[in-house]
Amino acid sequence: MATATFFIPSVNVIGSGALNDAATAIAQHGFRHALIVTDKVLFDIGVVKQVQELLAKSDVQSSVYHGTHPNPTTRNVREGLEILKTNACDCVISLGGGSPHDCAKGIALLATNGGDIKDYEGVDRSDKPQLPLISINTTAGTASEMTRFCIITDEERHIKMAIVDKNVTPLMSVNDPHLMVGMPKGLTAATGMDALTHAIEAYVSSAANPITDACALKAITMITDSLRTAVKDGKNMQAREDMAYAQFLAGMAFNNASLGYVHAMAHQLGGFYNLPHGVCNAVLLPFVQEYNARVASPRLKDVAAAMHIDVSAMTDAQGAKTCIDAIRQLARDVDIPAGLRDLNVKEEDFNTLATNALKDACALTNPIQGTHADVVGIFKAAF
């Protein structure tokens, strides 16, 4: 087995009351002026004000950038960085789901390294640690609050750039399930399926190791047990907390084993059509695993077992098929669209999408390194 390096924030606060504990910890680090990076919805409903008030009680001032798009852009990063510089902020706080977290990572990285965020596309392109980042999560899916992944849409090229860099790992992650209660059903479903995708892609990844395997399989079980309930009854605190832990475990898995073609392809759909990332992942997941099953069927059989399916009498191929069927059933149960056609994706764009997907850093650890024709074929199957 090759040498493995494990990346994770140095402090991770999970559970009811985590937000209050985080505010105290931020002050204890000696920070005095934070840039809060968030979106307009959280700003308008008062969640940002709640965080600002908690910070103020600990004598920490804050400025706010609330212009983050659902697929954060290069312009979002530039706008947030300008506010940070104007107010001489000494730390960044991301508040929200994957979009504010990724935008904040881009801002914090440029604050210390300079240049343009496009300069850092790829793996470990930065020289210096980013400005300290505290990530307060309000969704249960992306795990961006604790990963070294930063996905930013290049508005000129209409693609999502994958920035995978140890220097964008947050200093602290915060997962308080009370902040997740307000998530609508559609977002709960999409982010939950995103977490499932993280866990499964990490488990079949060519860079998987025993630590990531354990995290991935436990995440799969918890998502299987809790996602349907969280979608149906958003106020069920046990389901919300279980999903918070599950998405974090999935994040630990893919942050270190990386991902595969689902994410490489979903990034292109999101950048090209401005589609929700979790929905794109959920639609593509079973089709990519059908492709991967030619080499990863034993691992997919393990995934089926983690989803509470008795695979003891099955061959590897049967177990893999059962796994893919179970993925599709879970997606149907939480009202995920059946195919890319439902997302208004155009078949004539598949060649371009496939070309860009194969350049995505996430493609490097797919268990099969396919051809351009293979990736086009997966897009067609998912259509």
Image: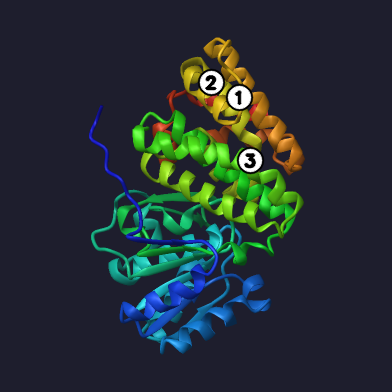
Residue 226 placement (x, y as % from top left)? 64, 45
Number of numbered discs: 3
Identity, as a three-letter code, of the amino acid under mark 1? Cys
In this view, the residue in front, 273 or 329, is 329
Are the residues at dot 2 and dot 3 in contact (C-beta closer than 8 Å)?
Answer: no
- CA gap, disc 1 and disc 2: 6 Å
Mark 3, secondary structure of its residue: helix
Helix, strand, or loop for circle 2?
Answer: helix
Amino acid type indicated by mark 2: Lys
Residue annotated with mark 2: 301
Report if the CB atoms under discs 1 and 3 are less than 8 Å apart.
Answer: no
Secondary element at image label 1: helix
Can you tell which quarter of the image residue 140 is in? bottom right
| Vertical relation: 125 (above or below) 5 | below
- Which one is in front in this view, the residue at disc 1 or the one at disc 3? 3
The answer to whether one can see residue 383 in this image is: no
Q: Nearer the viewer, residue 4 or 118?
A: 4
Residue denoted by label 1: 323
Report if the CB atoms under discs 1 and 2 are less than 8 Å apart.
yes
- In the image, 148: left or right of 291? left
> Could you give the CA–CA distance between mark 1 and mark 3, rounded to whole angstroms?
15 Å
Which mark, by number, is residue 108?
Answer: none
Name the residue tied to disc 3.
Answer: 225
Q: Residue at x 32, y 66 (%)?
A: 130
The x and y percentages for residue 14 are 48, 60
